[in-house]
Amino acid sequence: MHKDKEKLNHAETAEEKETAEKEFRGRKELKNEVVKLKSEVEHWKNEYYRAYADTRNLRATLEKEQSRALKYRAEGFIEALLPILDSFYLALKQEPTDPALKNYLTGFQYIYRNLVSVLENEGVKEITPQVGDKFDPLKMNAMDVVETDGEANLVANVYGKGYQLHDMIVRHAMVSVTGKPKAKENKPEQNPEAQKPEDAPKHEDQCKCDA
């Protein structure tokens, strides 16, 4: 009877031990699975944030390009108008004495002002330097240099207006600028009375040999 009881206790102990080991292995496997799932969650969370950031950056880039396209949409149109604006500019600089031509000029001025007004509504501004202004390389193109003893780097003549669309230069104003005279080379003065070697008198041999 005592031996049977010991066997029973031993069997129960072995069973409990096996059960405990199974529970331990189960908890360990579950813990490993949790760690694996957490790692996957972290991975996909990072992927989501990365994709979200890329999407935001792409959207911002597209919006910026769209905004720029709308802002400067008139650039090509303005460039096509430049020859016409130049023709108006040259015509309006004339001072005709004929009354009929003066009437035509008045009409040109009206058309030109209206055209400029329309362009200004689109963000276009004229670049109109005046003689004596400081030369600005960002808005002006120096076509020539006029030597002067006065201050250098000033606008000497204006050949054509420039145009800008908002903050973008469509065409620089064409001007000439003042500059200091070029230094003359100092050449040594020649004495006009100096004889050239070939002009020196030739001396005849005065020594005659007696026969």
Image: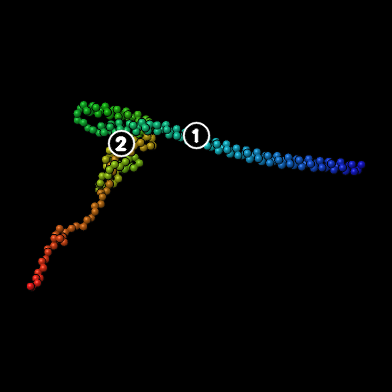
Secondary structure of the residue carrying tag 2 is loop
Q: Which residue in the protein does label 2 denote?
A: 161
Image quadrant occupied by the N terminus: top right
Q: Is residue 30 above or below residue 192?
A: above
Tell me the residue at 63%/39% (across/down): 40
Tell me the residue at 66%/41% (across/down): 35
| Residue 59 badge | 1
Examine the rendering and report whether any part of residue 120 can be seen: no
- Marks counted in the figure total 2
The amino acid beneath tag 1 is Arg
Tell me the residue at 30%/36% (across/down): 161
Relative depth, front residue between 186 and 43: 43
The amino acid beneath tag 2 is Lys
Q: Of marks 2 and 1, which one's residue comes earlier in the chain?
A: 1
Q: Is 158 on the left or on the right of 22, as rendered? A: left
Location of residue 50 in the rendering, given as x and y in whole percent from the top left corner: 55, 38
Q: CA distance from mark 2 to mark 1?
A: 39 Å
Image quadrant occupied by the C terminus: bottom left
Location of residue 198 in the rendering, given as x and y in whole percent from the top left corner: 15, 60
Q: Quadrant of residue 106?
A: top left
Location of residue 28 in the rendering, given as x and y in whole percent from the top left corner: 71, 42
